[in-house]
Image (cartoon, rainbow, N blue to C red):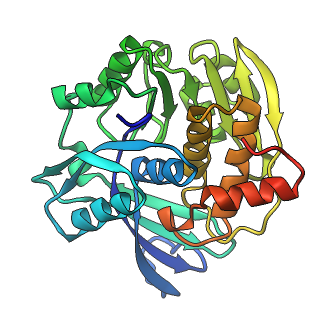
Amino acid sequence: MSTIAVLGSANMDLVVRQSRLPRPGETMFGASFGTVPGGKGLNQAVAAARAGGEVAFLGAVGRDAFGAQLRERMRADGIDVSRLVDADDPTGTAHISVLDGGENAIVVVPGANEALTAFAEADRRALVGSRYLMTQFERPLPLIAEALEVARALRMVTVLTPAPVLPVDAELLDLVDILVPNALEARELSGIDDEVDATRALSRHAATVVMTRGERGALVARDGEIVTEVPARSVRPVDTTAAGDTFVGVLVARLSLGALLPDALRSATIGASIAVTREGASTSMPSWDEIEEISAAAGAAPG
């Protein structure tokens, strides 16, 4: 069985590069258009696999051309797709505007990602023998909650990216070993305006909270206290799409291979910094060799 199971979304990203967002009622020209395999679940699975993790993907796609392309993308990265279900709904899509400077705006149409709302028996069996469960909020919340409960019963390490952020009960957060929100998600999830206080509050439920802050690095909290500040690596961003997913995927991959948390965080930071210098989601994600080379050049032991 794979060491890392990813329960998540698989979308085809429809990407337009443009100078700015249009005003209401305005039509404007874009600079380019492309299709890129994405979805937070697929992105994290690809990032983890390229960083050396042994990954299985639990998800759903439509019986259409996009679904076939997403399945092949994951297979090409060595990801086990035996639990990638063909649904009657069309494959999910994400409509992404990438602005000058690298920032993005995204609208997701879930499609097949919402087709299954209960954790199938075959999925339960797929988790047996795995050590990590990674999930996000681009699948139905009842499915996510059930999967976390099953993983906890199997003594797996549970990793949750609360995106897109949703209001959830504290009981769900209590099932999470590693929670990885960005600053906005930490504030909205906790109901606290200050991102540092929000991170502290969330760590009273999830065992470890890693709050990512883009170019400001990340904060790590446990038991209501900030325990580590992780500096960012300075780069010139081209496209920030999937930077957070790269961070999480690399982090879990390196932990699964025995790295200590500080080393895994360092590798995750380097991985995300590489991803933002390239266009696209899964297409931007680095290999372990690329991460290791930069880590070695900086004089740090790769995690």
Residue in view at x 43 percent, y 59 percent: 77
Rendered location of residue 175, percent (x, y): 46, 16
Image quarter of residue 253? top right
For the residue pair 301 and 118, the one nearer the viewer reads as 301
- Residue 194 visible in image: no
Residue at the far right in the pictured view? 299
Q: What residue is rendered at 62% in x and 39% in y? A: 254
Direction left: furthest residue: 88
Q: Quarter holding the N terminus?
A: top left
Question: In the picture, residue 287 is in which quadrant?
Answer: bottom right
Horizontal and vertical percent position of residue 130 = 40, 28
Instruction: Judge by depth and name the residue closer to the eye, 56 or 36.
Output: 56
Numbered disc total: 0
Apparent side of residue 155 relative to residue 75 in the rendered image (left or right): right
Q: Does residue 183 appear to the left or right of 8 in the view shown?
A: right
Residue 219: name its quadrant. top right
Q: Where 106 falls versus 247 (above or below)?
A: below
Look at the image and tell me whether residue 6 can be seen: yes
- Residue at 75% over, 45% down: 302
At 40% from the left edge and 55% from the top edge, which residue is drawn?
A: 78
Say which quadrant the C terminus sits in: top right
* Relative horizontal placement of residue 201, taking residue 148 as reference (left or right): right
Q: Position of residue 114 (x, y in %)?
A: 23, 43
Q: Position of residue 65 (x, y in %)?
A: 20, 70
- The answer to whether residue 222 is above or below residue 94 is above
